[in-house]
Image (tube, helix red, strand yellow):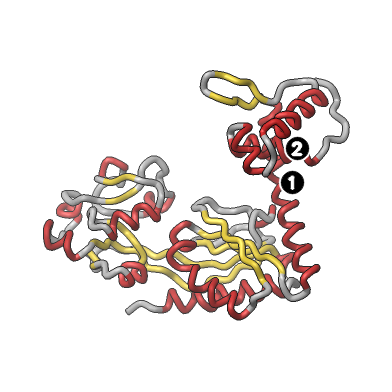
Amino acid sequence: MRMAGKLDWDLLQSLHAVLEAGSFSAAARLRRLTQPTLGRHIDQLERQLGAPLFLRSPRGLRPTDLALAFRPHLADMAAASEAAGRDASGVASGEGGVVRVAASDVIGIEVLPSILTSFRRKHPGVDVELALSNKIEDLTRRDADIAVRMQRPTQNSLVAKKVGELTIGFHATAEYLERRGTPTTFEELVGHNLIGFDRDLPELVNELAIGRPITRDLFALRTDNDVAQLAALRAGFGIGACQKQIGRRFGLVPVMADVFSFKLEIWICMHETLRGSPRMRLMFDHLAEELGAYAAVTD
């Protein structure tokens, strides 16, 4: 491989897009370029590096070891570039700007919309970006500005505040329980249509006890998407776990509440370097207040 010298960030953005999207066509859409333009970017990078970045096979595009070596560096650069854009927007607009909030799928879809709506009404100059994933976003890398997390953060460089706890328990629709009966023991529970995980074993599972190992074969419906689990629960497929607040909102019936439940802490986190940003502080405080109030509603 030849020494590359200084590489063009525009070309590296195209490489990052292909690594993320998995194909030239999808990467071109991601970057809002034509596919031939994106292809020229990759060709130019390969000429500068003196080695291929991708191999084509019947299974599609396969990144070489060289391309994979770039991946973590490109992810850091992309996160820094996006964070710089958000920071610059705040400086340019005075009181406004952009705040990127990370949260889990369920929190982002079922809990945050009304909270973010009230924030926007109070602060119309602040735009919100919502990044939903059950993976923990790296706030030290500025993948997001503020995160709502369901466990205590471990990074020393974060400002973090615990605002409450959520109780998770089994629920089902009244129609399902009328049709199948209401279990009162774990032995009865395993005979029901249970809704749970598929391939991604949640870490929390190792801390729970239901009288037998919790494995995927226990579930009649398996999906690693928490929102899909909730949708199946609301549709009456069977019994699944959800927040008490969400269960109450959709008229779900608690099942074995005196036998089984667990708690998740709610933490609001941001990088300590953002303390001085007015819009970050406003969002941090708003999330802390509103999610604290949400968690406090138990009846």
Query: Which amino acid, by three-letter code, is at mark 1?
Result: Met
Q: Position of residue 162 (x, y in %)?
A: 54, 71
Position of 297 with respect to 210 (left or right) is right
Q: Which residue is mark 2?
A: 12
Residue at 80% x, 25% y: name it.
49
Residue at 32% x, 49% y: name it.
196
Q: Position of residue 251 (x, y in %)?
A: 27, 70
Q: Nearer the viewer, mark 1 or mark 2?
A: 2
Residue 253 versus residue 200 in the image, above or below? below
Q: Which residue is mark 1?
A: 77
Residue 216 shows in this picture: yes
Q: Are marks 1 and 2 in contact (CB under 8 Å)?
A: yes
Query: Which amino acid, by three-letter code, is at mark 2?
Result: Leu
Circle nearer the N terminus (1, 2): 2
Give the numbered dot on residue 110.
Answer: none
Residue at 47% x, 66% y: name it.
265
Callout 2: few (<14), some (14-19), or many (20+) C-alpha neighbours within 10 Å? some
Position of 187 with respect to 111 (left or right) is left
Q: In the rendered image, which quarter contains the C terminus? A: bottom left
Q: Secondary structure at mark 1?
A: helix
